Image: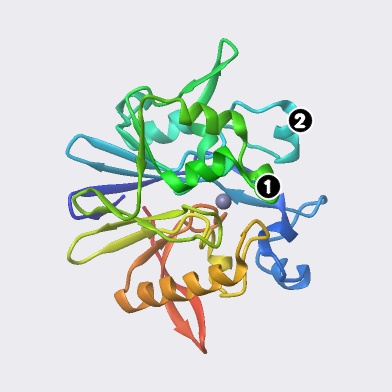
């Protein structure tokens, strides 16, 4: 657990999946990235889909929701989807599904939204019955009508379930959702309407960068995902964000890193590298 102001921050290692290594590292050749993450026999790399839980004065806020369970056997095999450890991980942080008050989505790609829903009687229903869902309006609009490149990343059934939810709160632009808990639109190069989460007091700042910096292996400025819609914009946004993180000595949270959940960042020979690993 990490305390930031009135917030107690916990990381929930709820689920793993595997993606093709080429899609995870974009233009970087395998001979380089396999030194960081070893692929399996199908060239897939194992990634975490961890959730960030922020607790404060009756609030229990989750950031992103992994993939969950409402997938066909075929899709579970393609993504080598692991077991869903939501209840165990929530319990270890002292809460249950019913206690979750808010779920913030950085964006609605399937590996960030699907776990908020489960199949019951042939329909998708909320895993968190008492939670409000927060997402940028522009991202929902993109998700409801995706372009051809992004269509495989936005799974319609989950996006439609969210859009139909009475608990949905659509956000336009930057927003201090709760004191010390800000939503920061950034990451347009990954997808339209992508947002970061910044939790801060006077001394400590932690930033969840969604898929703008999905793992410590993506600190290299040209290490983008093949899913990014505007790779040059990702480089520009990442350069600016990492500069702020280094200068402010902030903590960067990695949602997909299979090895570490968070770290401070430093410059080394003109490159950005993980410095001090932080456990939540
Ligand atoms: Zn994404």
Instruction: Looking at this view, name the residue that lies furthest to the top.
Output: 121
- Secondary element type, mark 2: helix
As measured in the structure, the alpha-carbon distance from the residue carrying label 1 to the one carrying label 2 is 14 Å
Identified at 42% across, 25% down, the residue is 165
State the residue in front, 230 or 213. 230
Q: Which residue is mark 2?
A: 74
The image shows residue 249 at horizontal and vertical percentages of 32, 73
Q: Is mark 1 within 8 Å of ligand 1?
A: no
Instruction: Say whether mark 2 is within 8 Å of ligand 1.
Output: no
Vertical arrangement, residue 23 with respect to residue 16, above or below: below
Disc ID at residue 2 = none
Q: Which mark is residue 18?
A: 1
Q: How many marks?
A: 2
The colour scheme of the drawn protein is: rainbow
> Which secondary structure lies at badge 1?
strand
Q: Residues within 10 Å of mark 1 (few under 14, many from 20)?
A: many
Say which residue appears at 45% left-offset and 49% top-offset: 106
Q: Is residue 87 left or right of residue 84?
A: left
Side of 154 where 8 appears, left or right = left
Which residue sits at x=52%, y=89%? Answer: 269
* Residue 160 x/y as whole percent: 53, 29
- Indicate the position of residue 67 as horizontal and vertical percent values: 57, 36
How many other residues sit within 10 Å of disc 2, few (<14), some (14-19) or many (≥20)? Answer: few
In the rendered image, the vertical position of residue 167 relative to residue 40, given as above or below: above
Depth check, mark 1 against mark 2: the one in front is: 2
Residue 71 percent coordinates (x, y): 65, 28
- In percent of the image, x 82 and y 51: which residue is there? 41
Comes first in the chain, label 1 or label 2:
1
Look at the numbered discs 1 and 2 and tell me whether their residues touch, using CB distance below 8 Å: no
Going by the image, does 159 lie left or right of 37? left
Given the current orientation, which residue lies at the most extreme right position? 41
Residue 35 sits in which quadrant? Answer: bottom right
């Amino acid at each position: 657990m990490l305390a930031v102001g009135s917030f107690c921050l916990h990381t929930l290692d709820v689920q793993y999946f595997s993606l093709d290594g080429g899609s995870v590292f974009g233009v970087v050749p395998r001979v380089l990235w396999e030194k960081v993450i070893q692929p399996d026999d199908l060239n897939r790399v194992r990634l975490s889909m961890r959730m960030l839980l922020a607790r404060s004065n009756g609030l229990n806020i989750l950031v992103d929701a992994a993939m969950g369970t409402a997938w066909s056997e075929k899709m579970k095999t393609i993504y080598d989807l692991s077991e869903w450890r939501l209840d165990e991980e929530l319990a270890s942080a002292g809460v249950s599904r019913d206690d979750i008050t808010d779920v913030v989505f950085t964006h609605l790609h399937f590996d960030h939204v699907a776990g908020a829903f489960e199949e019951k009687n042939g329909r998708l229903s909320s895993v968190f019955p008492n939670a409000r869902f927060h997402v940028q309006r522009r991202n929902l609009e993109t998700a409801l009508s995706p372009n051809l490149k992004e269509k495989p990343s936005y799974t319609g059934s989950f996006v439609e379930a969210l859009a139909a939810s009475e608990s949905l709160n659509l956000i336009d632009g930057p927003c201090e959702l709760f004191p010390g808990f800000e939503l920061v639109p950034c990451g347009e190069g990954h997808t339209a309407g992508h947002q970061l989460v910044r939790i801060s007091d006077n001394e400590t700042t932690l930033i969840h960068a969604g898929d703008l910096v999905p793992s410590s292996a993506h600190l290299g400025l040209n290490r983008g995902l093949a899913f990014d819609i505007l790779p040059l914009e990702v480089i520009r946004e990442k350069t600016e964000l990492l500069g702020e993180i280094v200068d402010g000595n902030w903590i960067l949270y990695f949602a997909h890193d299979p090895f570490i959940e968070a770290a401070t960042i430093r410059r080394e020979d003109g490159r950005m590298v993980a410095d001090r690993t932080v456990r939540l």
